[in-house]
Image: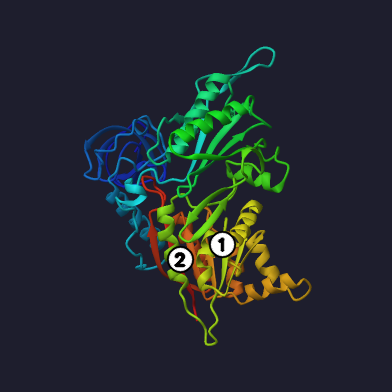
Amino acid sequence: MEKGQIVEVRIEDMSHEGQGIGRADGLVVFVPGTVVGDLAKAQLTKVKKNYAFSRLGEIVEYSEARDEEFDCEYFDEGCGGCPLGGIRYDAQLELKERQVREKIQRLAGVEDPVIHPIIGMEPGDNEGLGCYRYRNKAQFPVSTGGIITRKGGLVENLGEPAVGFYRPKSHEVVDCGDCYLQSMAAMAAADALRTFMEEDNITAYDPKWDKGLIRHLIVKTAFTTGEVMVILVINGKGIPNVSKLVEMLDDAIYEVGYSLESVVLNIKKAEGVKKARSEREQAQAMSGEIMGDENIFIAGKNVIRDVFGDLEFEISPNSFYQVNPVQMKRLYDQVKEYCGSEVDEEGKKPVILDLYCGVGTIGLYCSDMAEAVVGIEIVKEAVIDANRNAVVNGIVNARYICGKAEELLPKYVAYEGGDELDLQIAAQIKNADIAILDPPRAGCRPELLEAVANVGVDKIVYVSCDPATLARDIKLLGEMGYEFVEAQPVDMFPNTTHIECVSLLQKVK
């Protein structure tokens, strides 16, 4: 096959960018604008040895999986915020469950894996909104189509401010006036920022020239308390006339029924690895992380407060917190079930390691069934939040440490004397029964998996948001003496291609 050729493709799967995937004469073809079940004619635009990219010509036969009631105008304009939005929800769940099964079977090498039916959202969830308006965190890239520097050094925007989401496979921002997945507070904040930038001629960051001010808008919404935190990621030290912006944000968020409790400027100036000063900044530059390390609190509190079950959590700008509260409960209930409630012959409860612990949500949720919980997290602010959350909830058997788990675990396993607190932590780690792993999408570092295996825990409960990296790590753990038992997919991210999955692995006796 060659570039420019017209092929007919039956769509069998979907990519992470929301493109349809099918085959033409044995060649895998990616077709934008299609969904599973479509029969489409496509023109090949780039042909490789085993796959090809294309542009959609026409859809010969529409899939029964299409959601005819989905009417988002920004989706039709190419917004990449919800790539599965045009597919019926039951078909989305079927697709995601199949992807988990296939990845674990093919990449982890597990024959006939036990994968339980996926847990999706119900129509009555989220105050009757079901699989819409479920996100408590929005991340909007901001753009003006570039900037231009006039004579005298005056920097101006080339176009109008766009606050929205990237077009698939690009860094072009599609301006989004309303996203069906985000909270009303997030959309109100986006509208206020857009208006402010227009009125006060505020520039957006242009990576081409490494100039311009506003990079991202991040909005965290606590659904149970109504508290909202707005984070403005900027390429500078401040925003001109920022008090006006704070007032506009406050008014807009109040009008939709929420309360603005915190406004934060997050400073992210270093771009390339050569410019990055610290090891942390270099890692950010290489990974494409949105936020920098420095936060300037310009209005309100340093944290917002949310309630989850019987627990109360304080959330700061850099700390991780699950984006879907309804599904978070179901996910954590599954984690707790996999941890079990067994006690040994002496009546002792298990010691749990909570790795990549964020603000401590999973470990604190499981603390009532544990002798002790030891959490490790690299983000300092999250560790502070986790320890404070333990205090707020009166939980005395959980403690959280800042650092890399792959470095701290071997250190404590070898620790023999000195500080009394370190001795206690070392004893708990050496006697740990269960490790809960909740890594980012890239999965666990091999060194961390090796460190966990060397501790010798009986169970590993792995919470993953990427089936491919989960399968890779299941295979690595298998080589280290841990057997895959079963997995439970949970649809934490409806209308997107992402899927959360809880897996249980048992040490081979």
Residue nearest the observer in this picture, 55 or 233: 233
Question: Do labels 2 and 1 touch, CB within 8 Å?
Answer: no
Residue 377 pos. (x, y %)? 62, 58
Say what amino acid the circle numbered 2 marks.
Answer: Val
Q: Which residue is at 24% across, 35% downward? A: 59
Q: In front: mark 2 or mark 1?
A: 1
Q: Which residue is at 46% across, 54% downward? A: 465
Q: In the rendered structure, find residue 335 and report the number of the disc placed on it.
A: 2
Q: Is residue 140 above or below residue 15?
A: above
Q: Is residue 150 above or below residue 438?
A: above
Residue nearest the observer in this picture, 492 or 211: 492
Lower sequence index among marks 2 and 1:
2
Q: Which residue is at 59% across, 29% downward? A: 205
Mark 1 Cα shell of 10 Å, populated few (<14), some (14-19), many (≥20): few
Q: Quadrant of residue 300?
A: top right
Q: Which residue is mark 1?
A: 393
Q: Is residue 164 above or below residue 111?
A: above
